[in-house]
Image (cartoon, helix red, strand yellow):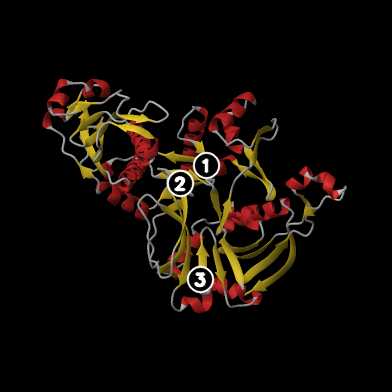
Amino acid sequence: MKINIFSVPPDNLAALEEKFETVGLEVLAQDQQDGWEAKFYFSQNEEPNPIPWVETFSDFFKGKEPSNLIYFAAYVFSKSDHCFVLTYGKSHFYVRQHCDHDFGIEMAKRIGTEGDIKQTGSKRFAGRKRKEIRSYTRNSPLDIESGESVDYLRTTIHGEARKRFGQVGKFGSSALLNVPMTKDQIGSLLNEVVELLKQDENFKLPRTTVIRDEEELRTYNEALLDAILDDDSAAEFSHDMHDLVGVDFVFTGHERYTLSLRGKKREFLGERELDVADLRQYITSERIPREDVLDIKIKVEAEDRKPYTKALGDAIEFVVDGENVMLAQGRWVRFNEDYVDQLDSSIDSITIEATELDLQSIAKTEGEFNDSDVVKNHGYLNADKDFTKIVTLMSVPVEAWDLYRSGVVYAVKFGTAQKLGYVCDQASNVLEILRNNANIKKLDQEVMSYCLWFGFKTVSVPTRISQTGSIILKQKIDAWARRCRDLKIEPKLKFSLRV
C-alpha cells in the first residue's frame, strides 16, 4: 500500500479542516484505529475543469467541448498530541501550508540508508544553480556539496525498518512509503512513526529548519516589508524551473499570473516573469497599506493543471543577512548547524594571500587605491575601468578586474558585507564570460588565479572568511570559488583594513 504521510502540528488541524471545507472536501467516512480518530475527506462534488487548449480548437468539437474531472482526497489521523494526514491527488497543495516541513527529512535520517541514495533535491542561495535534482546509481553514498540545503531524498530503507516501512522511500516535507499493510493498519503504523521520531538520527544533513517563534516571525516579516517597499533588491520572486511539493517535483513553464487583494482591483500580468517591481507598482497604484501587503495573493494559471492561488510569501525569496535566516516557499527558515559548518569549512579552504604591510590599512576609495604609487611599487598593474582586457565578439564592454600581478587577477572592494557581495557577483559574471570562451575575441592577460581583495571597515581584519557574520557573503564566495575551480583557476582571498 502506497501512502504519502504529512505531519501536521495539532494546533494547525482546525485551520486545515477549515481549508478542506473551502476547497470542497467533505468527510466521507470516520473511524478509529489504534487510538487515532480518523476522517476520510473526499471532493464529492468536483466541478468540471476547463481545458485551456480546447478553447483554441472549439469549432472542432461542435459545441461539445470536453473538460476534466480531477478528484482528490485526504485521510486525517489525529490524537491529543499528534496529527498525520495521508494525501491523494492535489490535496497535498493544501496540507503543505499547515504541515511540519521537517517531518519527511527527519524520517529519512532515521530509516534511510546513507550509503544507498537514489535521488536528492537541494537548493542553493547563491551562484547559478538555485535548485538541483540529482539521480544516482546503485549504492551511491550521500554526497552533498557546500552551500547546498537538502530538501528531498529518495533512498533505500535500512535493515529491519524495511519490514515495516518498505524497500525504498521518498522524503521531503512528507514521507512517501510503499508499506506492506492494509488500510486498517494505518493507525498502528503511525504509532510506530511517533516512536521512531524519538530515536537518534543515523546521519546528518545540511538543510534549513522552520522558525516557529511568533516574535521572531514578526521581526522577519517587518524586514521583508522594508525590502519590498524600499526597492531593496534582496527580495525577489523565485523563478525556479521546478518546485518541491511534499515529495513531488512540479515543473513550471508558461504560467499566467494575476495579483489580487480583497477590496482592490486585480492586476493581470500575463506570461511575463514575476518581478518585485511589478508588485511594488501594484501596491502603489492600488494604495495598499503596509499592513496589508503580505495579504496579496498570486493566481497561477497553466494549461496542464487547475488554476491555484498562493500567498505572496510563497512566491518570494528573501535572506535576512547576518542571522542565517531566509524566507523560502512561504516559511521562514534557519540554516542548521550542519549547513553552516559545511559552508564555513568550504570557504576557509580558499587560499588566503598575505597582504603587504604597507597595504594593510586602506584610507582611499577603490579607484584611488588601485591607482596609487604604493600599489604600483608592489608590482600590481592597474586594470580598473580598463575595458580592453576582455573583448567579446559582440564588443560588449567588460570591466574584467581591478589589478593584475604575475598571473593573478584581483577584484578590489571596500565596505559593508553587501558591497563585498557585489564584487563576488561581478567576478562570477567575468568567470561566466571566460567559461563561454567562444564569445571572447581577445583575452589580454593569462588568468591562473582569481583573488577577491576585501577592504573591511571593522576593528580588525578577520583571519578566516568564515568569521564574517554574513551568510549571504559566505554563500556568494563559495559559489564564486566553485566556479573558479570548474575553470581550473585557483580562487584566492586577500584582506585589508579600511580606515
Where residue 294 appears, x then y in whole percent? 58, 37
User: Is there a contact, CB below 8 Å, between mark 1 and mark 2?
Assistant: yes
With 168 as the anchor, is 364 left or right in this view?
left
What residue lies at 42% left-to-right and 44% top-to-bottom?
A: 125
What residue lies at 56% left-to-right and 64% top-to-bottom?
A: 82
- For disc 3, the neighbor class at 10 Å (few under 14, some 14 to 19, many from 20) is many
For disc 3, the marked residue is: 168
Amino acid type, label 1? Ser
Quadrant for the C terminus in the image = top left
Give the CA distance from mark 3 to mark 1: 31 Å
- For disc 2, the neighbor class at 10 Å (few under 14, some 14 to 19, many from 20) is some
**Quarter of the image holding residue 16?**
bottom right
Where residue 489 appears, x then y in whole percent? 27, 44
Give the CA distance from mark 3 to mark 2: 27 Å
With 318 as the anchor, is 446 left or right in this view?
left
For disc 1, the marked residue is: 238
Number of marks in the rendered image: 3
Give the CA distance from mark 1 to mark 2: 9 Å
For disc 2, the marked residue is: 130
Nearer-N-terminus badge (3/1): 3
The secondary structure type at the circle numbered 3 is strand
Q: Is residue 297 above or below residue 339?
A: above
Amino acid type, label 2? Arg
Q: Camera-side residue: 169 or 305?
A: 305
Q: Camera-side residue: 134 or 231?
A: 134
With 299 as the anchor, is 121 left or right in this view?
left
Quadrant for the N terminus in the image = bottom right
Q: Is residue 462 visible in the rendered structure shown here?
A: yes
Where residue 245 appears, x then y in whole percent? 57, 54
Amino acid type, label 3? Val
Q: Camera-side residue: 391 or 470?
A: 391
Q: Camera-side residue: 372 or 497?
A: 372
